[in-house]
Image (cartoon, coloured by chain):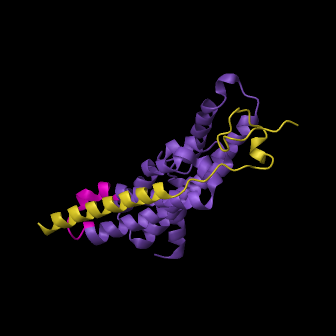
Chain colours: A purple, B yellow
Amino acid sequence: MDNTTLIAFAINAFLVQNIILTQFLGLCSFFGVSNKEESALGMGLSVLFVITVSSVVTWLVYNLVLVPYDLTYLRTIVFILIVSALVQIVEMFIKKVSPILYKSLGIYLPLITTNCAVLGVALLNIDNGYDFSHMLVFSMATAFGYTFIIYIFAYIRDHLDKAQLPRALRGVPIALITAGIMSLIMTGFI
Amino acid sequence: MSSIIVGILLVISLFIFFTLTIFINKKTKKPENFEIKGFIGSCQSCEQTTCPIHPGDKKEEN
């Protein structure tokens, strides 16, 4: 497959089939950590790392262990354990390197474990039958798409907090309306 | 038969690895409360009485 096709494949995963706004995965952290731009960027980068590494590990385990031994029915529990262990490692790393980010992410950092976007990407790689290069491009593009959208959403929410809004719309209601409009925009690509 | 043994070993080893990471994570020292000089830009418009990022800090009076 040539580079142009691979780039088109990456753009498709990044924008057209965006994990949040088109496939509606990872919405918990999308709403929970998008209050501040710094937190959103930190969360996005953490998810980027976890999705990329977990996709590589799960793909290797699936194709090198589960398929040869006819154990594909174990994939869900195996993938969950791999993702959980990786999240613990990321948490340790952030705790050491950036205490501010650790405090601002709060409970949402261990909750990456239950972020369905991470498990969703690992399972999509298997279900779509990607080879290693496609799996890597798809995982990274999807994770970048997650980071991009959560950062844009945090930027919009930051400005909406300063806007003069009716009392009933302040906070979560206007965030949900904004997310709905953003999702509608994404349907234009399909 | 061998595939079942491999499956059991795989799940048990992954579970042990996961438990080990939790154990090491718990041992890792939590960051202490730290002071920040002044307020960062995003704090300027904050109306919350208790800071979620720095619970010990209070907004300075101008």
Q: Residue A171: horizontal and vertical position, in percent?
A: 64, 32
Residue A5 to residue A149: above or below: below
Q: Quadrant of the rendered structure where residue A41 is? A: bottom right
Main SS, magenta residues: helix
**A3 displayed left or right of B33:** left
Question: What is the tally of numbered marks visible in this picture?
Answer: 0
Out of A71 and A182, give the one closest to the viewer: A71
Q: Residue A88: horizontal and vertical position, in percent?
A: 46, 57
Q: Is residue A73 magenta?
A: yes
Q: Residue A31: horizontal and vertical position, in percent?
A: 56, 41
Pick out the residue farthest to the bottom: A2
Residue B13 to residue A4: above or below: above
Q: Which range of residues does the magenta coloring cover?
A: A66-79
Q: Residue at x 39, y 61 (%)?
A: A125
Asked whether residue A12 is in view, the answer is no
Out of A136 and A15, give the one closest to the viewer: A136
Asked whether residue A78 is in view, the answer is yes
Pick out the residue farthest to the left: B1
Residue A60 to residue A126: above or below: below
Q: Quadrant of the rendered structure where residue B14 is? A: bottom left
Q: Residue at x 41, y 53 (%)?
A: A120
Out of A17 and B62, give the one closest to the viewer: B62
**A90 displayed left or right of A128:** right
The N terminus of chain A is located in which quarter? bottom left
Q: Is residue A184 magenta?
A: no
Q: Residue A58: horizontal and vertical position, in percent?
A: 37, 64
